[in-house]
Amino acid sequence: MKTKTFLHLTFYSIFWVWNLAFLGLVYFWILPTIGYSLIEATFSGLIPNQFLITFIGIVAIPTICTIFGGWHFRKQPLQLIRLFYGVEAPLFLLCLLRLFVLRELTQASTLILGTILVSIIAFALELLYGYANRNRLASWLQMFAHTLMLLTGLYVGILLLFYAVTASAHRGPVRPSSKTFE
């Protein structure tokens, strides 16, 4: 019984500490300092609309998940942690990836991001409605979504493996030699 209580307390703590800290940071620091100027620059045409949409996503995702988690999963800590790690964190990271890494979307990056987005939406629907064991079509669609999640996770994991191996092989900063080139 103690282990279960400890896990529930841990799940609540992870979800609420992250969301309340993030909301405080965003609404009291980032939005007043950066948000309003970003909105003005977008409407004046200095910044493309995609950056504003991504910024709105970064602000809206934790806000919506906090409200939804507090309203719908208040007494279900396992569902709260599934909402956090299965929906909120991946969507938030997807928006950060779009904002800071992927400036221009190619067809390949659009396919990968779209597949990840479909997987997140499928997991969110499963979180809300549970496993589809009565409807045959819904269970097949859910199985397809689980397969898509697995294959996408394997693909991203293998892709990140290339970077992790090379990063771990790097032992420190490269220092220039003492000889000067003339």
Image (cartoon, grey):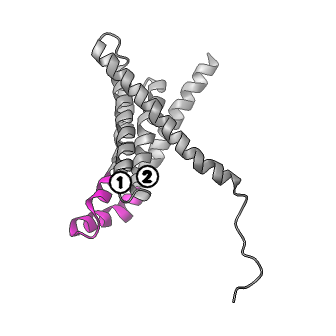
Is 100 or 73 nearer to us in this picture?
100
Q: Main secondary structure of the magenta part?
A: helix
Alpha-carbon neighbours of circle 2 within 10 Å: few (<14), some, or many (≥20)? some
Where residue 30 sits in the image (x, y, percent)? 40, 59
Span shown in magenta: 28-56
Which one is earlier in the sequence, the residue at label 2 or at label 1? 2
In the rendered image, residue 83 lying in the magenta stretch gets the answer no
Q: Amino acid at mark 1?
A: Thr
Horizontally, residue 70 falls left or right of residue 158, namely left
Q: Quadrant of the C terminus?
A: bottom right
The x and y percentages for residue 125 are 33, 27
As for residue 52 lying within the magenta part, the answer is: yes
The answer for how far apart the CA atoms under marks 2 and 1 are is 14 Å
Q: Which marked residue is nearer to the observer: mark 2 or mark 1?
A: 1
Could you tell me residue 11's position as x and y percent?
A: 53, 30
Above or below, 179 against 138 in this view is below
The quarter of the rendered structure image containing the N terminus is top right
- 36, 126: nearer the viewer: 126
Residue 87, by quadrant, is: top left
Q: Amino acid at mark 2?
A: Leu
| Placement of 126 over or under 61, stated as above or below | above
The residue pinned by badge 1 equals 106
- Per the image, the residue denoted by label 2 is 97
Q: Residue at x 64, y 53 (%)?
A: 166
